[in-house]
Image: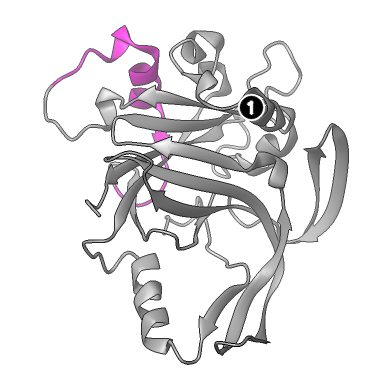
Amino acid sequence: MFASGCSLLPSGTWSGTSLEDSVDAAEHQRVSKLTHKSKHTISLSADFRHVNTGELDEALWQHVDETAFAPQVREEWLANGFRIGLIAVPEVMQTSGEDHDVDSDPINRLLSTAGVLGGIPSGVQTIPLRPSQRHELPISPVLEGSHVVLAQQDGKLSGRTLESPQLTFSLTPTLGPAAGQVTLDIRPEIQHGSVQQKFISSDAATRLAAGRKTWELPELNLSWVADSQRTLLIAPVHQPGQSEPTFGMARQMLRDTDHLQDDQHVILLLRIEDIPSS
């Protein structure tokens, strides 16, 4: 999906494939690989950028609506080094050819100078989603080898030694609650280990599941009522005056591997573009 050096290598969790529904499974696979779009598809724009952490100061966050999410959810993300909120669709993300005064707004100024990750000139990937179906979005590169991953869960610090960990968002969209809106359930997970396969039997069919092990982080589960006018910003917390400008899971997972020496980090902007009428 992304260029070498900054690759967010996809790796699945357990994902069921019915032997009876091989045609449907193949169709779903094509959607996941961005080669098919139907009238029922929801288009998600994912924009990965690398920035100097000093750009993520309070002046920027004054233009971000952090209150769109419940305080308890925001506190869990903050405890793990992440900051989240909604912004109006930045002018520099729009496709218009008009010139914009990027210096007049901190969001536009940030994105006009932020480096692009990936092989697409604009830096924006359009990801087809299907209502009520799980999709996976890799957020970080796979960290090769064995790593200790720390997470704050319910006020307690827990750590696990994991092989080749990778932060992934499990995305499940549903239409509504209002016309022109999509509720996107975001479940952050740490995938790790090697890909395995196993058969799962049920009353309906026998399914072949393939994927990696998953460390679920339910405290970070996020439900976002999205429309085409607002963008979800996910970024590391900037802590000025500290020896390390970021901390926690965000520091480990939102690093730009091409800019470790200058300590640049990755930010993610998500926006719903196309919503089916029914």
The picture places residue 76, in percent across and down from the top left corner, at 71, 31
**Viewport quadrant of the N terminus:** bottom left
The residue shown at (22%, 51%) is 277
User: Is residue 108 highlighted in magenta?
Assistant: yes
**Viewer-proximal residue among 162 and 50:** 162
**Viewer-proximal residue among 26 and 218:** 218
**Residue marked by disc 1:** 74
**213 shown above or below 65:** below
The residue shown at (44%, 26%) is 86
The residue shown at (11%, 24%) is 98
**189 shown above or below 113:** below
Label 1: which secondary element: helix
Specify whether residue 157 is in view: yes
Horizontal side of 14 relative to 186 (left or right) equals right
Location of residue 228 (image quadrant): top left
User: Is residue 201 highlighted in magenta?
Assistant: no
**Viewer-proximal residue among 219 and 245:** 219
Residue located farthest toward the left when viewing the structure as drawn: 97
Horizontal side of 119 relative to 51 (left or right) equals left
Horizontal side of 272 relative to 72 (left or right) equals left
